[in-house]
């Protein structure tokens, strides 16, 4: 694995809409009993706070969304549809809500572990969708709040290889029940791991 440096808090303590394209090309590394899986982020979605009706923080601070209020650089993990976990990188300033949902990634290291965790999957290298991504990394509720910027953390965020701006595309977020046309989804244009767009509209928790 390449000796990339950890992302810094200053790089994430910014508007999530600015942080989202920065995170493309960054790598998440998760270490557990099975070993280490490392993935390169190729699709993300930005969520703000009280000015974003699609955000968990739109109606204020709760025990569920508390991690999303900062400090930047922590992992916000939530359970959705009664069966899946989704993971977000917390951004913005401490006390100001904001996060970036990690939607899709390419496996850089640990494909054998991913295969063991997802034996029926068609691909163990292209992780399409946030639930598939968290499953491949072995993330669950126990990882909510972990510090991604701590070298000793079980989940770490590294700089990876920067994506040229010409390869970054943007469009509406997938499956949200509000602000359906807000173009805060960002992805790497030529990646096979990018998920299929599905417009929202039905009332669903994000």
Image: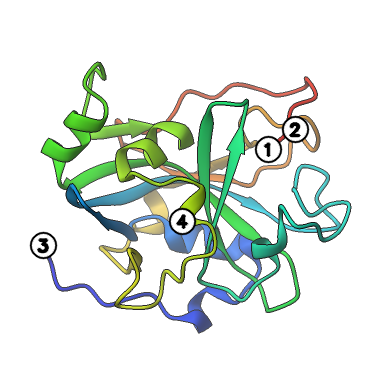
Task: Say which quadrant the N terminus sits in.
Answer: bottom left
Residue position marked by numbered label 3 in the rendering: 1
Element under label 2?
A: loop
Q: Sequence order check: which comes first, mark 1 or mark 2?
A: 2
Please rate how many residues cluster around mark 1, counting C-alpha atoms within 10 Å: few if below 14, some from 14 to 19, many from 20.
some
What x and y, as percent, mark residue 101?
A: 55, 48
Please rate how many residues cluster around mark 2, counting C-alpha atoms within 10 Å: few if below 14, some from 14 to 19, many from 20.
some
Residue at the (35%, 58%) spot, across then down: 164
Q: Which mark is residue 143?
A: 4
Residue position marked by numbered label 1 in the rendering: 206
Rounded to the nearest angstrom, the CA distance separating label 2 from label 4 is 29 Å
Residue position marked by numbered label 2 in the rendering: 180
Labels 1, 2: front one: 1
Above-or-below relation of 153 to 40: below
Rounded to the nearest angstrom, the CA distance separating label 3 from label 1 is 33 Å
Would residue 177 appear left or right of 22 to someone viewing this image? right
Residue 27 in sight: yes
**Colouring:** rainbow
Front residue of 142 and 11: 142
């Amino acid at each position: 694995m390449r000796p990339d440096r950890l992302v810094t808090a200053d790089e994430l303590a910014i508007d999530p809409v600015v942080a989202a394209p920065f995170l493309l090309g960054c790598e998440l590394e998760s270490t557990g009993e099975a070993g280490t899986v490392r993935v390169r982020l190729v699709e993300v979605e930005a969520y703000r706070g009280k000015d974003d009706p699609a955000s968990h923080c739109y109606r204020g601070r709760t025990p569920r969304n508390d991690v999303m209020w900062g400090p930047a650089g922590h992992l916000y993990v939530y359970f959705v549809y009664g069966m899946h976990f989704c993971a977000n990188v917390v951004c913005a300033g401490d006390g100001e809500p904001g996060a970036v949902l990690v939607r899709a990634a390419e496996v850089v290291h640990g494909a054998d572990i991913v295969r063991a965790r997802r034996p029926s999957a068609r691909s163990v290298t292209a992780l399409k969708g946030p639930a598939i991504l968290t499953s491949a990394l072995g993330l669950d509720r126990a990882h909510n709040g972990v510090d991604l910027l701590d070298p000793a953390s079980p989940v770490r965020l590294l700089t990876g290889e920067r994506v040229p701006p010409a390869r970054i595309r943007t469009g509406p977020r997938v499956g949200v029940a509000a602000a359906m046309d807000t173009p805060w989804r960002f992805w790497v244009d030529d990646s096979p791991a990018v998920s299929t767009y599905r417009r929202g509209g039905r009332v669903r928790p994000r």
